[in-house]
Image: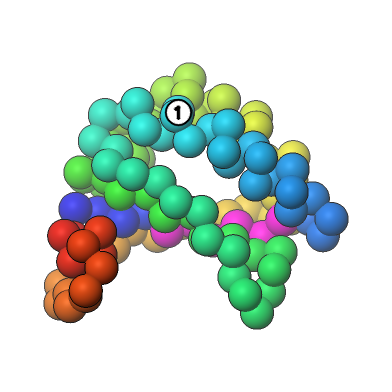
Amino acid sequence: MIVEVAEISVKTGSEAQFEAGVSRAAPLFLRAKGCHGVALHRVVETPHVYRLLVKWETVDDHMVGFRNSEDFQEWRRLVSPYFDGAPKVTHSEGVALSSTEPSLAQE
């Protein structure tokens, strides 16, 4: 399992609109080939910074399949007006996991 982490800074004062846009966009991710879940986290220390976590079967499912889809264009239409700069996107895979939380331990 691959975890996409997109760190997104939003314009101050547009946090609620951004969160609403992500909620509307969640089904776009969930119907994409290889997507196993999506979650949005707000950084406690810097409330205008968010981390979008998306579980993908493969990097290509994200970078080729989803990124070249109309659903990706719709995702960007819903949320990009609130971006304060370009998101920083990375992909990771679990190498050593230990958790009592089932959703974390299944990586």
Answer above or below: position of 70 versus 60: above
- Residue depicted at x 59% and y 64%: 42
Tell me the residue that label 1 is attached to: 28
Q: Whole-percent x and y of residue 107?
A: 18, 60
Question: Between residues 102 and 61, which one lies in front from this camera angle?
Answer: 102
Residue range corresponding to the magenta coloring: 5-10
Q: Residues within 10 Å of mark 1 (few under 14, many from 20)?
A: some
Q: Quadrant of residue 30?
A: top left
Q: Whole-percent x and y of residue 84?
A: 73, 55
Task: Pick out the residue farthest to the top.
Answer: 70
Q: Is residue 12 left or right of residue 84?
A: right
Magenta includes 54? no
- Residue depicted at x 71% and y 64%: 48
Camera sees residue 93: no
- Residue depicted at x 21% and y 74%: 100
Q: Is residue 18 left or right of residue 59?
A: right
Task: Pick out the residue farthest to the right.
Answer: 13
Q: Quadrant of residue 92?
A: bottom left
Looking at the rendered structure, the kind of residue marked 1 is Leu
The main secondary structure of the magenta stretch is strand
- Residue depicted at x 65% and y 47%: 19
Q: Secondary structure at mark 1?
A: helix
Q: Whole-percent x and y of residue 25?
A: 54, 33
